[in-house]
Amino acid sequence: MEQKVIELDGYTLNRHQIEKVAYGEYQAEVPEQALERVRKSRKRIETQLDEGKIIYGVNTGFGKLSDVVIEKEDISKLQLNLLRADAVGIGDPLPTPVVRTMMVLRANALAKGFSGIREETLNLLIEMINKRVHPVVPSKGSVGASGDLAPLAHIAIVLVGEGKAEYEGEILTGKEALWKAGLQPVELAAKEGLALINGTQAMSGIGVVTLNEAERVGLAADMAASLTMEALHGVITAFNKDLLAVRPHPEFELVASRIRNWLEGSKRITKQGEVRVQDAYSIRGIPQVHGASWQTINYVDERLKTEINAATDNPIILENGEIYSSGHFHGQPIALAMDFLKVATAEWANISERRIERLVNPALSGLSPFLATNPGLECGLMVAQYAAAALVSENKVLAHPASVDSIPTSANQEDHVSMGTIGSRQARDIVHNTAKVIAIELISASQAIYLDEAEDMLAPATKKYLDMVREICPPLKGDQDISEEIEKLAAFILREDVLK
């Protein structure tokens, strides 16, 4: 079967295409028009070097050492030294899909033709993606300016046969991994080490993976809310289209219409005054609270759309031959966006945990205490709510903005940094925690519906999803350890697109 391919042309890549490459469904290639830009950019660097021009990071030192001029015979060694010096990441390795996303993003940025990299060096990076040579990239060590130096250096150093990489399940030296994949390391030329690492692709890479997961979590949150409404005879009146129109945030109606459609045909949903006049905020306010988080998803999506197809490097080689130093490596746009994403996705967990409480609390639900089949002898889902509360509390700590912090580096030459990579890592932790909270709500709603023998009264859409939930966690007939089921259901939420 012919391998599907996504083109990295520097201008049209989107995060859904990236995900297909990140998870190995598609391969990557740089089209000829982009390669021609790369060749022209390389020629501009070589021309200026031949003319004796002094260019930052090409024939000078880096950071505070930028005033040190490097002799021509040492230019290649300068680039290798840069990778060796900057590969100082620490902590657990980033997951393979994140590393592959980083590689795709950096290749796409280089394909724009503003960095001066050679065609053969870019091609090796593409071959590493396609042959699944995955550098081992420690998760910590970037301050988010001047680019994500440490994480990207751990990728780049494998191109020269150093560092470590995973290939076919083995952790090998960079040279061994390349050799086993049928590839040869490159010897870096002028500017290439800097071109490979001076960008925001760690924070953006984690951000792309996290945003794709966050979208799925948001859809699962909307579905979990729908099932909870059925379990508790929720009042659908608050989701009325005309009512939502008087406060015309589009995402309010987006959530409300989604839930109205999913609940079409339900015999469990009530209208205002039939069972109660109004629900608690965690149900009545679903369009407003969930919708506000969806607004943030859209904002972060716009920031990442731009960054995915941006040249993040220093210096930049323009098409007219001018070479300029600037701050295009700075991660502030992504840092702020990821901090915003943290707050938005934490809110899905906050309100979900309150709905869990309404399901397990007999004074609020009218159901068996803690949804136990034999209360007293059994605890039911009492401590599942504790687990949700713990995750929500952890999210609140993680949601503190990383971008408000800055510690100067490089002897105060780099005196403001974004800390965006910290924020991106925290955002992914929050999204994963939130997936687990939503999983607990789904299990709780499922159990409430089971105890009330209400399966035949559900809407077709919610019943179909409930059946998928129950394939992972069937209704509880007594107390049992469900930690594994929560993890499996959270993984299902994060990766499956059944609600799109």
Image (cartoon, rainbow, N blue to C red):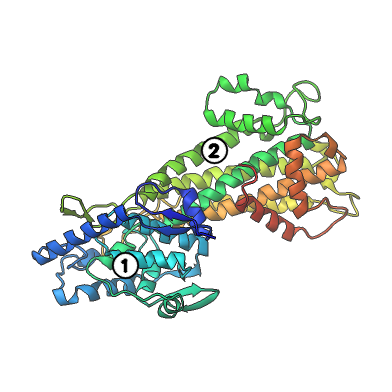
Q: Nearer the viewer, residue 211 or 235?
A: 211
Mark yes or no: residue 400 visible: no
Which residue does the image show at 16% across and 72% down from the upper left? 70
At mark 1, the secondary structure is helix
User: Is 313 on the left or on the right of 284, as rendered?
Assistant: left
Residue 100, image x, y percentages? 46, 62
Above or below 67: residue 430: above
Q: Earlier in the sequence, mark 2 or mark 1?
A: 1
- Give the quarter of the image for residue 228: top right
Q: Assign the C terminus to one quadrant of the image.
A: top right
Mark yes or no: residue 356 visible: yes
The three-letter amino acid code for the residue at tag 1 is Thr
Which residue does the image show at 32% across and 53% down from the upper left? 330
Distance CA(mark 2)–CA(mark 1): 40 Å
User: Is 414 on the left or on the right of 183, as rendered?
Assistant: left
Above or below 68: residue 115: above
- Give the quarter of the image for residue 53: bottom left
Q: Assign the N terminus to one quadrant of the image.
A: bottom right
At mark 2, the secondary structure is helix
Residue 456, image x, y percentages? 85, 37
The three-letter amino acid code for the residue at tag 2 is Trp
According to the picture, the residue beneath numbered tag 2 turns out to be 294
Extreme-left residue of the structure:
51
- Give the quarter of the image for residue 429: bottom right
Above or below 46: residue 355: above
According to the picture, the residue beneath numbered tag 1 turns out to be 121
